[in-house]
Amino acid sequence: MPNGEDKNWIRLCGAVDGFRARYGSWPTKIKIPFEIIDDIRGVFGDEMFEKVVTRVKFEAIDYIAFIAEDDHGRQYNYVQEGFSKISPDIQAMNWFEIE
């Protein structure tokens, strides 16, 4: 389990990578607690955060979860499943264009 300053970013990417590996497509939203959305914005600043939200919509929830989901209801829950044992063809950090 990641525990550094960017731990929530790594967990979010774990959810997106797991979704991509499982379904071969990208999620359209990420369900995470509001305070984690703020934490991720704080790690990157507004400009980098905008790169992320052009790819996925954040849905604030009131419980601890990192759930990547698409418009068909398909999900990958990082909290329940952890990092995928299968690597995606494109990693989330590359898709988000975060260096």
Image (cartoon, helix red, strand yellow):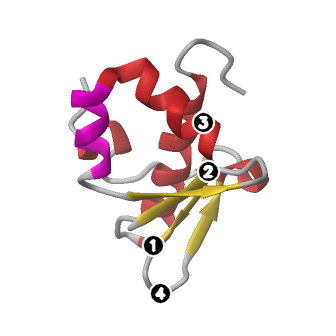
Residue receiving disc 1: 23
Q: Label 2 neighbourhood size at 10 Å, few (<14), some (14-19), many (20+)?
A: many
Whole-number angstrom distance, CA of label 1 to CA of label 4: 11 Å
Q: Residue at x 35, y 22 (%)?
A: 44
Q: Amino acid at mark 3?
A: Ile
Q: Are marks 3 and 4 in contact (CB under 8 Å)?
A: no
Residue found at the very far top of the displayed protein? 4
Q: Is residue 65 magenta?
A: no
Please state the horizontal and vertical placement of residue 31, each as a whole percent of the image.
Answer: 58, 58
Q: Are marks 1 and 4 in contact (CB under 8 Å)?
A: no
Q: Residue at x 58, y 71 (%)?
A: 75
In the depicted structure, whether residue 84 falls above or below residue 21: above
Please state the horizontal and vertical placement of residue 9, each as a whole percent of the image.
Answer: 50, 31
Residue receiving disc 3: 36
Toward the viewer: 34 or 22? 34
Toward the viewer: 16 or 63? 63
Q: Earlier along the polypeptide chain: callout 3 or callout 1?
A: 1
Q: Looking at the image, is mark 2 or mark 4 nearer the viewer? A: 2
Q: What mark, if any, has residue 51 been given in the picture?
A: none
Please state the extent of the stretch shown in magenta in the rendering. 46-53
Whole-number angstrom distance, CA of label 3 to CA of label 2: 7 Å
Query: Would residue 66 be found to the left or right of residue 20 on screen?
Result: right
Residue receiving disc 4: 72
Residue receiving disc 2: 32
